Amino acid sequence: MRRGLVVLALVAVLAGCGVPVDSEPRNVDNADAGVPSHGPLVLDQGTALERLCFVRDGRLARILRRVPSPVSSQEQLEALLNGPTPSEAADGLSNTLPGTASMVKISLSGGRAVIEIGDRSAHGVRTDEILAFGQIICTLASRPEIGTITFTSRGLPLGVPRQDGSLTTGPLTVADYADLMDS
């Protein structure tokens, strides 16, 4: 009898370790959904992961790279601006961002990243600006210390296009570009 009670108690404890069931459907945050693996990660390439967002077939595509050690937000932004590796490009990834990392600086304060892009006139007007800003936001929003992102040029707020084409100088998140993400 005692053995039966022990087994029953053990079953009850183990049953409580499963995934809880919701009474209604709920939305799932797709921050990690659709992240292609692009094959196995090679361990000799590094022990830390860096998440970047490039473009594939006109859509934002998240990738993971192995790096030797964790990188700062500025280093991650510079890696993004440098573009995909030759193997990533062969996989169909491209970059809509200009490769001038020295013109882009990031500062962090209270969960908000402020991206200073320098003199806006040097960048010209591009038809793919929505994807370009989406790449930066998608990349940096993967960092736990960054909740929202704003942009400045010459220290002044910069109007940035959302996925619907509307301009905002306010804080942006991945949700502002969710419809442009690979699924």
Image: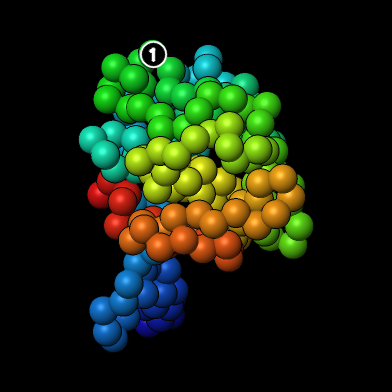
Using the rendered image of the protein, determine whether residue 30 is visible from the camera's viewpoint: no
Quarter of the figure with the N terminus? bottom left
Q: Is residue 27 above or below residue 180?
A: below
Direction bottom: furthest residue: 23
Q: Nearer the viewer, residue 16 or 89?
A: 89
Relative to 150, residue 93 above or below: above
Circle 1 residue: 86
Camera-nearest residue between 28 and 90? 90
Which element type, helix, strand or loop, lies under badge 1?
Answer: helix
Residue visible at 50% across and 54% down?
160
Residue 118: image quadrant is top right
> How many numbered marks does the figure carry?
1
Q: Which residue is rendered at x = 49% and y = 35% of the image?
A: 124
The residue at 33%/27% (across/down) is 93
Task: Using the image, determine if residue 142 lies above or below residue 147.
Answer: above
Colour scheme employed for the rendering of this structure: rainbow
Image spot of residue 31 (x, y percent): 42, 55
Can you give x and y, in whole percent of width and height, for residue 122 in the image?
Answer: 58, 32
Residue 88, visible in the rendered structure? yes
Q: Nearer the viewer, residue 124 or 19?
A: 124
Under mark 1, the amino acid is: Pro
Q: Residues within 10 Å of mark 1 (few under 14, many from 20)?
A: few
Quarter of the image where one finds residue 177: bottom left
Q: Position of residue 19 (x, y in %)?
A: 36, 68
Residue sitting at 26 percent across and 39 percent down?
58
Instruction: Classify residue 3 as left or right of residue 74.
Output: left
Q: Position of residue 59 (x, y in %)?
A: 29, 42
